[in-house]
Structures are given as C-alpha cells and as structure tokens.
Amino acid sequence: MEQTRLKTTQLGETGLEITRIGFGAWAIGGDGWEFGWGPQQDEESIQTIHRALELGVNWIDTAAAYGFGHSEEVVGRALAGLERRPYVFTKASLVQGPDGRLVNNLKRDSILREAEGSLKRLGVDAIDLYQIHWPIPEGDVDEGWSAFAELKEQGLVHHIGVSNFDIAQLQRIDQIAPVETLQPPYSLIAREVENDILPFTKHEGIGVIVYSPMGSGLLTGAMTQERITNLPENDWRKHSASFQEPQLTRHLAIVERLKKVATRLDTTPGAVAVAWALRNPAVDGAIIGFRQPDQVGSILDADGLELNDTDIAEIAGEKP
C-alpha cells in the first residue's frame, strides 16, 4: 500500500525529519513487569507496527524497561527485513529489579551494558535517539549523561536526549554535552510542562516529543468507569490516581467536551486530544501507543487536524 503523506518537522536541531506522530512501544512490552498494560500478543504488536509504518509513521519510541527488553525485541522483529526502517528511539536508566520491579541506575557501566543490550534486541548498528528515562538517582545524573555522550562519540547512538527532566537538570547536564531532545508527559490532564519547561526548550532549540497525549487511554472516549473496573490487575492504569476518584470524574468531563468537538470535526476524541498537544509550538511530535492495527488510522487523523479558537475554548469548558 502506498504510504500516507504525514506532516513532518525537524526534531529540534538534530536534523531528524520526523512525522508529527510516532509509534509508542510501551504497551507492547506485555505483562509481567511493574508498569505493564495487561496481556498483549506479539504478532498483533508486529502487525500494528507494520500498519503504522504503512500509513507513513517514520519513528518508533521504546525503552529497555518496557517488559525488561521485550518491547525492544518485538520492535526488532518488526523491523527485520524491512527495505527502509523508521528512526528508532529508545531509553536507558531503568533496569530489572526483584519481583518484576524497576530499579533506577545511571552508573556508567550500567548505561553501557544497557546500550549494548538495546542494540542487539533492536537489531540496529546505531540507535537514532538514546534518552535517559528518568533523572534518578539525582546524584548520578552527571555520570549517566557523560556515558551517553561517550556512546554518541563512539557512533553507537546518533543523538542523545532525556525524558522527565526539569529545567535545572537540563541546564546542569548541558554543561557536559548538549541536550538534543526532551520527552515529557503532556496532555489535557497533564499540563505541568506548559508554563516553564516547554518555553525553555523552544528558546534553547531542544527538540520535544511528548508522551501520553491521550492520557494513557483516558482521553480516547473509550474509557469508562466500568471499563476501568474490568481492566486486568496487571494493567498499571487500574491502580493509577488518574483513573480513580476524585480525578476520574474531572478527566471524563474533559472527554465529553472532546467528543463534542470530535463530532463537529468528524473525527475521534483521541485524535482531537493529540491535535491539542501538537498545537503547542514547542512540541515537535507526539508518541501514540497503538496496540491493534485498526487503532492506527483514526488517531493519525490528528496529523491534519487544525483546531481553531472555538474548538480550544470548548475543550477547555469555556463559554463562547
């Protein structure tokens, strides 16, 4: 099938020309770890990746932590044999601990081991963008970032960035090596980065790809109290404060407003939520965690969705 022409943009000053929507591989890590999304079939994950690429998506974001390497293995299987592969972004600093738990580690030796494992699982010679997953432990951030700079110098990664860092942390590590990208959470239910962090990245030329623009499924229009109750026990969302009262009622009220806008624009609430996040001038791309092939097309509508002031006011619950 001929690829759909999706909008692209420069990711900060990396020189990477990315589609505004990327494939997020968190959920395809499967279950059996601390932040799993419940059962997921690998073959369906591979079909979903292929569908996204078929429709023009040109980057995948994953992490060694997702399923303790399983997500990267699935991505590697999906990419094997492709004539033209997408950009591959992954992360380090979360390693396997006891009882399916994650442990933060920013020591140089650990980072270098993680990079070696990720390269092998993904089946690539170099990672296009390598990111520190969390700035924890705080005291080891400099050592971890120095290891990232070392990997870039060796050519094992092409670009280096971070996820979940604040401004002070970005400024601190920039003294060691330039920070090329930031990956923060950003959505209608997680707007903390709007006031300071996103303006800072825009001013500094740091590329931004946001995660969870649909609130981990809350803003898709498909999430209800009943569905949350019936989520598998090993789906992390079932125990998240965002999916429980008192926050849940506020979040579902936003969904009702998204539905009204989506109906008027002949699209889905999820696509409107993603378009809302992409509307911020500091945001280069948004990570979408597709799990089934038939989910891909409707959310890609966000790529060409232009929200006007009336739409934005309605989503915010403001009177015209």
Image: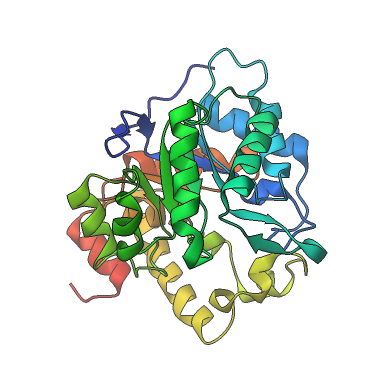
Q: Quadrant of residue 62?
A: top right
Where residue 29 sits: x, y (%)?
70, 48
308 lies above or below 158? below
Q: For the point 60% across and 71% down, which residue is it?
A: 224
Q: Is 83 left, or right, of 227 in this rendering?
A: left
Q: For the point 71% across and 44% down, which residue is it?
A: 69
Q: Which of 81 and 139 lies nearest the eye of the viewer?
A: 139
Where residue 234 sits: x, y (%)?
76, 65
Where residue 223 sits: x, y (%)?
59, 66
**How are the colours assigned in the image?**
rainbow
Q: Is 208 left, or right, of 205 in this rendering?
A: right
Q: For the point 68% across and 46% down, which residue is it?
A: 28
Q: For the point 41% across and 57% down, which residue is it?
A: 184
Instruction: Look at the image and tell me whether residue 281 can be seen.
Output: no
User: If the image is split into quadrants, where does the N terminus sit?
Assistant: top right
Instruction: Look at the image and tell me whether residue 103 can be seen.
Output: yes
